[in-house]
Image (tube, rainbow, N blue to C red):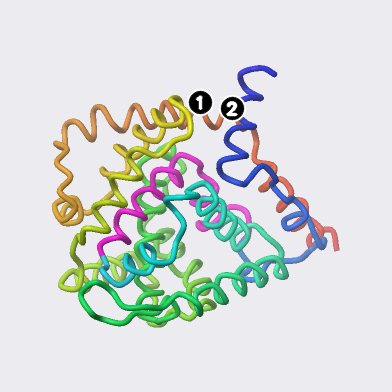
Amino acid sequence: MGVRERIAAELTATMHGGDLRLERYAGPPGDPGLFGIVPDDPVWRVHGHATGMLTGGFAALMLQSLHPLAMAGVDQHSDFRADPVGRLNGTVRFVTTTTFGSAEAAREVIGLVSRIHTRVRGTAPDGRPYRADDPVLLTWVHTAEVRSFLAGHQVYAPRRERLTSAECDAYYRGVAPVAEALGARDVPRTASAAERYLTGMRPALRATPAALDSVRFLRRFGRTRRERFVVRLLMNAAVGLLPGWARAALGVRRPAVVRVCWDRPLAAAVGHVLVWGLGPSQIQAAARGRLAGARRG
């Protein structure tokens, strides 16, 4: 097995559990998907950019951890420490299926996540009750996630492929129905609304011991030395995608010159290698083939 094949196999195992399950994306012919997301749509473009999604994904986990109730749910119910790859597979499966999958496949993963949410409830260390299907928490998790994905795309996509202001707003509108299908309410539908939402949430946010521990865990994550090295580079780059107040809350001190002149070029280089190793996306190719059925019809 050559270098490229080894990279592809390792990434497929880490991100997708070793099986892309292309049948979720390939049919039925002409199926528009649950939310009508199509090639060249801002959602497709953002979620199809590997480096932006990897760095944005790590940034999302750090930002989400600042909500004490959301973090308590993860800390008390998730097996991310024992099986971090399994949790990553679940997140990747949800995002790729709702973006590129058929309507039936999207409904299936949304239903699965919704059922899991009904079982996640408890009491945070500060004494407040929480439940994962709380619309307030669902809106927080969604907004922190998609804001981070978009930030990753806008930094790491080639300049000609970055979204305009109008396309950024279209991205937020495009992803909102996914959150609402899970039960979120009052989901931001423009970039400015998302930033206002985050500003309004700041009084409720803080770095709990569980949040700080989760960030330390992420920085050490990796089953091999090579994987740990790549994760550390991507985590450093993800720090640069966070709002300044979020970095301060997490106690991350990484000067701007380091973030821009060191972290970004390294993450971009790693991203190029990973994209080269993966080759053209089989998931996107399958989805394009499915959507082409509608045009032929």
Camera-side residue: 149 or 78? 78
User: Mark 2 or mark 1: which comes first in sequence?
Assistant: 2
Q: Is residue 197 left or right of residue 5?
A: left
User: Mark 2 is on which residue type?
Assistant: Ile
The location of residue 267, given as percent across then percent down, is 37, 32
Decide if residue 71 is on the left or right side of residue 117: left
Residue at the disc numbered 1: 273
Crowd rating for badge 2 (residues with CA inside 10 Å; few <14, some 14–19, many 20+): some
Total number of numbered labels?
2
Q: Which residues are magenta?
A: 38-66
- Looking at the image, which residue is at 43% across and 66% down? 77
Q: Compared with residue 46, is residue 207 higher up or lower down, i.e. above or below?
A: below
**Please, what secondary structure does the residue beneath circle 1 have?**
helix
Which quadrant would residue 246 be assigned to in this image? bottom left
Kindly identify which residue carries mark 2. 7
Q: Nearer the viewer, residue 192 or 82?
A: 82
Q: Amino acid at mark 1?
A: Val
The residue positioned 55% from the left and 51% from the top of the image is: 86
Reply above or below: 93 against 174.
above
Whole-percent x, y for residue 250 in the image: 19, 52
User: Residue at the spot x=51%, y=26% of the render?
Assistant: 273
Asked if residue 217 is positioned above or below residue 37 in the image, the reply reads above
Residue 52 highlighted magenta (yes or no): yes
Residue 265 quadrant: top left
Closest to the camera, between mark 2 and mark 1, is 2
Q: Is residue 82 left or right of residue 288?
A: left
Label 2–label 1 contact, CB within 8 A? yes
Assign a secondary structure to mark 2: helix
Residue furthest toward the top? 2
Mark sitting on residue 99: none
